[in-house]
Amino acid sequence: VKKELKRLPPSPPRLPILGNLHQLGALPHSSLCQLSRKYGPVLLLQLGRVPVVIVSSAEAAREVLKFNDLACCSRPQLAGAGRLSYNYLDVAFSPYSEYWREIRKICVLELFSVKRVKSFRFVREDEVASLMDSISQLSSSETPVNVTEKVFSLTGSIIFRTAFGKCFQGSEFDRTKFYELVHDAETVAGRFSADEYFPGLGWILDRINGHNERVERVFHELDTLFQQVIDNHLKPRRTKPQEDIIDVMLRIEKEQIEDGHAWLTKNHIKAVLLNMFLGGVDTSALVVNWAMAELSRKPRLMKKAQDEVRRIVGKKGRVTETDLDQLLFLKMVIKETLRLHPPAPLLIARETMSHFKINGYNIYPKTLIQINAWAIARDPQYWKNPEEFSPERFIDNTVDFKGQHFEFLPFGTGRRGCPALYMGTVTSELLLANLLYCFDWKLPGGMKEADINMEELAGHCLTLSKKTPVLLVPVKYLHDQASEYTI
Ligand code: HEM
């Protein structure tokens, strides 16, 4: 019986104190992929004092996310995330509880439902049109455009306007400062502090490297921003052409008070706003950025995607969301990008609440679970020529990313799966379609396709960025006739 209880997943050898921390490397998803090839698809690591199980096969991911989803649908309580989320009043970092179920219900039914996301269609189309305009002006100079910067600024503007109801232009917020704040928040929220790896000792390191100070600064800057926007929404004579996310949450707060069972407060609203900025800005932008890099390396695929969008959209002047359903090849490009470059390669860490087994191995409560979605989506067991960017692999192939196919999980699945899958994909599709419809893209002088650097950026904790920006020269595409709309 004792032996059976001890049947733990295999582990690589450990160092004293550090455990396996030194084996994570600069790109943990990639180092962990190597380790699981050696030790198996269910691997137990000891990161400082924290036991972590790494799951790297579709079968084991199904065991975890389908058959044992309830046992492992909590999150580890990290101090940075806790502080930024007003002590876990958010959705993403909140541990499993009755409260989390209620707030998640609001997200799924009210904030990120297809109907609500469609109500913000005008925001996305308007922001994309402004971006096309600004690239168009640059296109006459034949100089490279920093596509990466443009794409991130677009998704930032979209989330800002969807949440707050106003654009950066004419608002009191500095766009660059805002992005820095979102990136800082992402870094401090997704990272274990030294104290969490080494309880009792690590706090010294946290103090020396300024971790705690940074968390406090980010918290106060975000809190001031959110409070300011909420106060503006509460002004009595505010004109409200269309409900934004803050309006929706203030309405729910009011309805709860009227019904006599109020629990939503301004701090809950701020915590959910934090999730929107952390979950929504980088993810959709990363997809478009990687897609543009991949297509620039393969002119045949770039042309195929451009021909499709130009044929379907014709001379309309811009792609709108009603066109997207017909853009079958473009959707395959997005899918293939999500396969090779999932924005959250290890999903978001889960924490187990009770004992269960995977592949016969015992997994105990308070263990962290990381699903290596990046490794699974590159496993030759499920994917032919897995390292090759080939959108055509999805022709006559029903595998998709909605959570039923465990070899392809860029949005996770189960109770903790991404509640904003539609918002993320529609934003990426609309942006990529317009970039391909409006412009031809040339490589900067003297550069060849093979010179494009596809390395991943080391050191980011939750998301997977490209190491170098995508720089391309836009050439305005002249659709046969005068366009109906300006671009
Ligand atoms: C291409 C775009 C996106 C990708 C690839 C993506 C991916 C993910 C992943 C992998 C998770 C963790 C799933 C798990 O633990 O099983 C997640 C959770 C989450 N995402 Fe997304 N996401 C995207 C867009 C968005 C957007 C636009 C928002 C909101 C504006 C958002 C909000 C959230 C939230 C709140 C959670 C936490 C859910 C929970 O813990 O219950 N995501 N997302």
Image (spheres, helix red, strand yellow):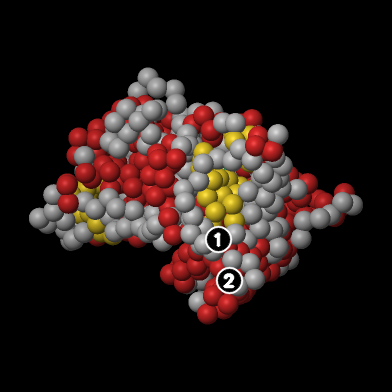
The residue to which callout 2 is attached is 202
Are circles 1 and 2 on residues that touch, CB within 8 Å? yes
Along the horizontal axis of the image, is 166 left or right of 3? left
Q: In which quarter of the image is the N terminus?
A: top right
Q: Tell me: 86 left or right of 263.
A: left
**In the image: residue 393, left or right of residue 232:** left
Secondary structure under tag 2 reads helix
Q: Which residue lies furthest to the top in this view?
A: 396
Q: Nearer the viewer, residue 195 or 101?
A: 195
The residue to which callout 1 is attached is 48
Camera-side residue of 396 and 154: 396
Kind of residue at disc 1: Gly
Q: Which of 322 and 256 is in front in this view?
A: 256
Q: What element carries label 1?
A: loop
Q: What amino acid is labelled 2 in the image?
A: Gly
In space, the residues marked 1 and 2 are separated at their CA atoms by: 10 Å
